[in-house]
């Protein structure tokens, strides 16, 4: 069999719903796409721990402090699980971190924004994690089986993040006017990034990751599912979604909304978001400060100062 | 650094299930990482760590699924017992009718 024939046979197997394991043969393009896709996901879990990290010391009660800390530990754990997959696919971890801090690889748009209040913590855990679980739920059926299995574990842990986030938001809207306002303002800050989260409505036939079965649902379908799951829940608690065009079109059977500015999304994920530089320099600093730990673990001798 | 494959038993008596892997320089660190990553919420009754090199993998279909009919080894191949029972019942009923008719 020539290389092209092998690739064709592989493609056919995937279309028939077969799964690929780490030790199986795979086309170079499939491997490269997997690395890029999973690496961005892993980076997002790691970078996603940073906005919430700022709120550990400012959590309003001991219970909230414990829960936020546990969520952050989970997110870093998710990054660990996913980086293992990328390493097994052939990219060493040091290179992954190097590329991340140099801005050569990406992480999700929502982690390029700053947080201003406890309201952001609730909205992030409920809706940002909620949007992520919609994608991750679909990824459980990825053609790359180790990724699908990891998604099952991650989604199970995410259930706690969503519920805790929702609890933060509900507690606040049951409280004082000021507390309600905190949530409304946070929702207004996060709505645009949330609508961009699943990416531009790329036609499914042009989406290579979809063709390889790395992901299983088109971007727009994920966004529609997100809206179907959360719009009513948000409105029921008296919060107002800041999009006058948002409505369910029952003739078309889909949500219509103000088209997000996709150039802005591109600018944000390529390192030009409001908190991109700060987050990356913090990550770079941590990487430098903890270099001695990695050296110690590797059993290298301390260098004379 | 070594890769350790992690197997987890969620409850006493249940099978050990592969859950993923960790990279660690030694056994003690590998155990800590595996606990931190795969059992933060009372999920494990027991963990097994196996150095990746120790895993022997085979996926060759000619070896695992030779093209010989082996259904005779399987319970489902004996579904005919249902039909046979029906036939036996009929046979007995027939005999009973004959005995009664003759008596
Ligand atoms: Fe996560
Ligand atoms: Fe999460």
Image: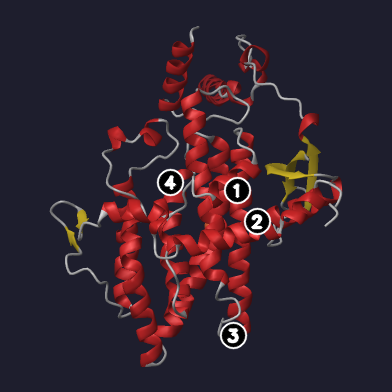
Label 3 to label 1, Cα distance in Å? 34 Å
**Along the horizontal axis of the image, is A36 left or right of B33?**
left
Q: Which residue is mark 1?
A: A97
Q: Which residue is mark 4?
A: A138
Viewer-side label of 2, 3:
2
Q: Are marks 4 and 2 in contact (CB under 8 Å)?
A: no
**Split into 4 quadrants, where in the image is the C terminus of chain A?**
bottom right
Q: Is residue A3 above or below residue A72?
A: above
- The quadrant where residue B92 appears: top right
Q: Are marks 3 and 1 in contact (CB under 8 Å)?
A: no
Label 3 to label 4, Cα distance in Å? 35 Å
Q: Chain of mark 4?
A: A
Q: Furthest residue to the bottom? A: A176
Earlier sequence position, callout 2 versus callout 1 = 1
Residue A75 % position (x, y)? 58, 59
Earlier sequence position, callout 4 versus callout 2 = 4
Q: Which residue is mark 3?
A: A61
Q: Which residue is mark 2?
A: A287
């Amino acid at each position: 069999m020539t290389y092209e024939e092998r690739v064709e046979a592989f493609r056919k197997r995937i279309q028939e719903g077969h799964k690929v394991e780490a030790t199986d043969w795979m086309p170079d393009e499939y491997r490269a796409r997997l690395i890029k896709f999973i690496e961005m996901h892993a980076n997002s879990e790691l970078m996603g721990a940073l906005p919430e990290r700022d709120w550990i010391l400012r959590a309003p009660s001991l219970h909230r402090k414990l829960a936020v800390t546990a969520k952050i530990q989970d997110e870093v754990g998710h990054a660990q699980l996913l980086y293992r997959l990328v390493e097994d696919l052939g990219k060493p971890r040091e290179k992954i971190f190097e590329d991340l801090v140099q801005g050569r690889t990406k992480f999700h748009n929502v982690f390029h924004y700053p947080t201003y209040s406890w309201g952001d913590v609730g909205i992030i855990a409920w809706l940002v994690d909620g949007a992520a679980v919609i994608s991750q739920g679909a990824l459980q059926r990825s053609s790359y089986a180790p990724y699908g299995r990891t998604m099952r574990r991650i989604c199970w842990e995410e259930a706690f993040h969503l519920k805790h986030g929702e609890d933060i938001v509900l507690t606040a809207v049951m409280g004082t006017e000021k507390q309600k306002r905190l949530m409304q303002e946070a929702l207004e800050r996060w709505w645009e990034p949330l609508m961009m989260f699943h990416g531009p409505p790329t036609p499914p036939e042009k989406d290579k990751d979809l063709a390889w079965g790395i992901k299983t649902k088109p971007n727009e379908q994920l966004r529609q599912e997100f809206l179907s799951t959360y719009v009513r829940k948000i409105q029921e608690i008296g919060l107002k979604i800041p999009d006058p065009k948002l409505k369910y079109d029952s003739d078309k059977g889909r949500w219509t909304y103000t088209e997000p500015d996709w150039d802005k999304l591109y600018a944000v994920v390529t390192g030009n978001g409001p908190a991109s530089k700060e987050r990356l320099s913090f990550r770079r600093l941590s990487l430098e400060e903890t270099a001695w730990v990695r050296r110690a673990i590797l059993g290298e001798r301390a260098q004379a100062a | 650094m070594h890769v350790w494959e992690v197997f987890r038993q969620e409850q006493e008596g249940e099978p050990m299930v592969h859950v993923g892997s960790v990279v660690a320089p030694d056994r003690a660190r590998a155990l800590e990482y595996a606990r931190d990553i795969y059992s933060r919420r009372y999920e494990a009754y027991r963990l097994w760590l196996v150095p990746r090199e120790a895993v022997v993998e085979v996926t060759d279909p000619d070896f695992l699924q030779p093209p010989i009919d082996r259904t005779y080894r399987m319970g489902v191949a004996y579904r005919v017992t249902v039909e046979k029972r029906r036939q036996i019942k009929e046979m007995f009923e027939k005999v009973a009718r004959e005995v009664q008719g003759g008596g």
